[in-house]
Amino acid sequence: MTRWRVHHKAETASTNADAKSGRAWDVFTADFQTAGRGRLDHRWLSAPGKNLVMSAVLPVEGLPPDHVATLPLAVGLAVAEALGRICRAGGVDVEVALKWPNDVLVGGRKICGVLCERSGDCVIAGVGVNVGETDFPEEIAWRATSLAALGVEANVRDVLSAVLKSLESVFDEWKGGGFAAIWPRIAGMDALKGRWLEVVQTDSDKAPASGVCGGIQSDGSLLVGATAIWSGEARILMPI
C-alpha cells in the first residue's frame, strides 16, 4: 500500500511552497501554478491542466548532508524510469536520459525538471513533467518535449501515479543503501558524459568550469575535466 497522501488544488502559487506545511509522504499537486520556478530561480512555465506539477515531502532525518545532496539525482532517476515505462507502454521506443543535476531528457530534449529544497527533517522534491504540452515558448521549443509531442497518449493523473510509485521505490533504495545503490542506473542514463561542457554556479558566474565531462561520479558530483563539480548548471558546448 502506498504511503503517499495527495493534496490537489486547481491553482496555486507554488506546490513547493504548499509542501512546506506538509508532513513526510505528503504530495501537493496543482493544475496550474502562478509562481513556479526551477533551479537558480529560473521561471517554470506550464499551461493549465496540461502537465504534471507536484511536490513530494521526503523524510531525510538523520541522513548525512552528503547523502541528502544526492537526492535530486535519485528523484530524477525515479521520474526517468517511470517515463521510460510509460513511453514503452505507449509504443514509443526512445532514449531516456538524466542531465546532471536535475533534468530528465527524452530523445535529447527536456521533459522534466526537479527542484529539491530542505525543509526541517524533510526534503521537498518539486517535479514538473511535460505531459500534454505541445505549444512551447519560442525560446525553449528547440530543447523541450512532452509525452504528447512524442506521440504517447497519457493523462496527468496516470503519470502522477506512475511517478509516485517509482519515486517511493527508488527513494527506499537510496535511503537504505546510499547513493551507491542506485548510481549504476544513473550512470547508465548519463546525458553529459563524453561531451564538452561548461558548468556555471550562478547566472552571473564569470569563470565557469569547462572541459570534457567524465560523467556523474559515485558520490553524485560531475567530473568536468579533472574537476569534481557539486552544484551548478551544465551547458553542452559540443560533443567529442
Image (tube, helix red, strand yellow):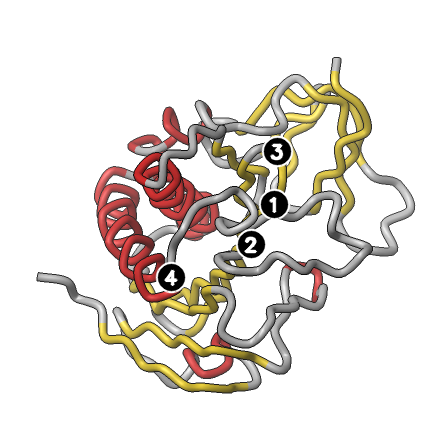
The numbered dot on residue 110 is 1
The numbered dot on residue 113 is 2
Name the residue tied to disc 3: 108
The numbered dot on residue 155 is 4
Q: Write down the quadrant of residue 208 in the picture.
A: top right
Mark 1–mark 3 contact, CB under 8 Å? no
First of labels 2, 4 by sequence position: 2
User: Is 15 located above or below residue 2 in the figure?
Assistant: below
Mark 2–mark 1 contact, CB under 8 Å? yes
Give the alpha-carbon distance from disc 1 to disc 4, as whole Å. 18 Å
Kindly state the secondary structure of the residue where label 2 is placed. Answer: strand
Mark 2–mark 4 contact, CB under 8 Å? no
Kindly state the secondary structure of the residue where label 1 is placed. Answer: strand
- Coordinates of residue 7 in the picture (x, y in percent): 32, 81
Give the alpha-carbon distance from disc 3 to disc 2, as whole Å. 14 Å
Kindly state the secondary structure of the residue where label 3 is placed. Answer: loop
Give the alpha-carbon distance from disc 2 to disc 4, as whole Å. 18 Å
Give the alpha-carbon distance from disc 2 to disc 1, as whole Å. 8 Å
